[in-house]
Image (cartoon, rainbow, N blue to C red):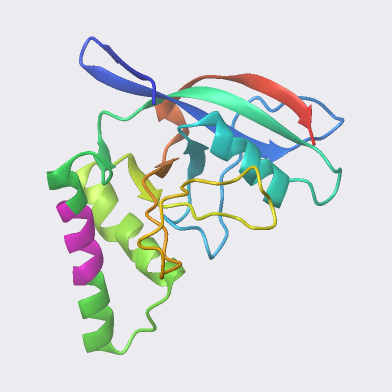
Amino acid sequence: MEIIDKEGVKRIKGYHTQEFWISGALANPIICKEINAWLGKGYYFWVEEEFAKYWGEDFKTKNTGSYDIYTGLLDTTNCIDAVFNLDGYYFFRKQIDKVVDKFKNEGIEITLKNVHDFLEENIWKEKGITGIIYDDLPSNNNAKPNRKYSLIKHSEKEHRIFYYHKRIQIVMFNLNNIHNFALHLEEQT
């Protein structure tokens, strides 16, 4: 992860994956509005090129068979860091737990979209949160042998694996916090 701290502004280089289109390179990242987006509506970036490529291979080749990877400098000064900052992690977790409890008490359906929409409208904006740094552990993909994140077994008898790589994403809620957006790798397959 590349962190650039300049004049008190924390910037992380991020990788944004989109389907390749013959019409040309994007001027800006495309906002994700999918109901199954892990962190709600926003501009998603990976902090490692490797995962941006896998995302392209798995999800961004449906129509044209190829994908592009863009880079951007992400101003993470006002982002929740739920990966490397203990306070950030517990703050993030506490806010989600509060929303889940509220929904339970009020009989509101607890879905990923509902929770993140509520957080965006009622908590993140109010607290000046501009994005979230989040990780989920990858797992070995037997269908794709180049994707082995660990060969460390729990024991000889068990098949559980000790995964120690983090698959870190950053969602930015505001385009103004994304700088120097540019095409990095074009027409990948």
> Vertically, is 160 above or below 3?
below
Q: Position of residue 129 (x, y in %)?
A: 27, 42
> Vertically, is 117 above or below 2?
below
Q: Residue at x 69, y 23 (%)?
A: 185
- The residue nearer to you, when weighing 3 against 151, is 151
Q: Position of residue 72 (x, y in %)?
A: 51, 23
> Vertically, is 6 above or below 43?
above
Q: Position of residue 110 (x, y in %)?
A: 37, 79
Is 136 one of the magenta-colored residues?
A: no
> Vertically, is 188 above or below 136?
above
> In the picture provided, is 81 more to the left or to the right than 165?
left
- The residue nearer to you, when weighing 188 against 175, is 188
For this orientation, the residue located farthest to the left is 87
Q: Residue at x 42, y 58 (%)?
A: 161
> In the picture provided, is 25 more to the left or to the right than 37?
right
Q: Residue at x 41, y 52 (%)?
A: 137
Q: Position of residue 115 (x, y in %)?
A: 36, 68
- The residue nearer to you, when weighing 137 against 133, is 137
Q: Main secondary structure of the magenta part?
A: helix
* Residue 52 lies in quadrant: top right
* Residue 188 lies in quadrant: top right
Query: Does residue 172 appear in this view?
Result: no
Q: Which residues are magenta?
A: 90-98
Quadrant placement of the N terminus: top left
Q: Residue at x 31, y 60 (%)?
A: 119
Quadrant placement of the C terminus: top right
Query: Does residue 25 appear in this view?
Result: yes
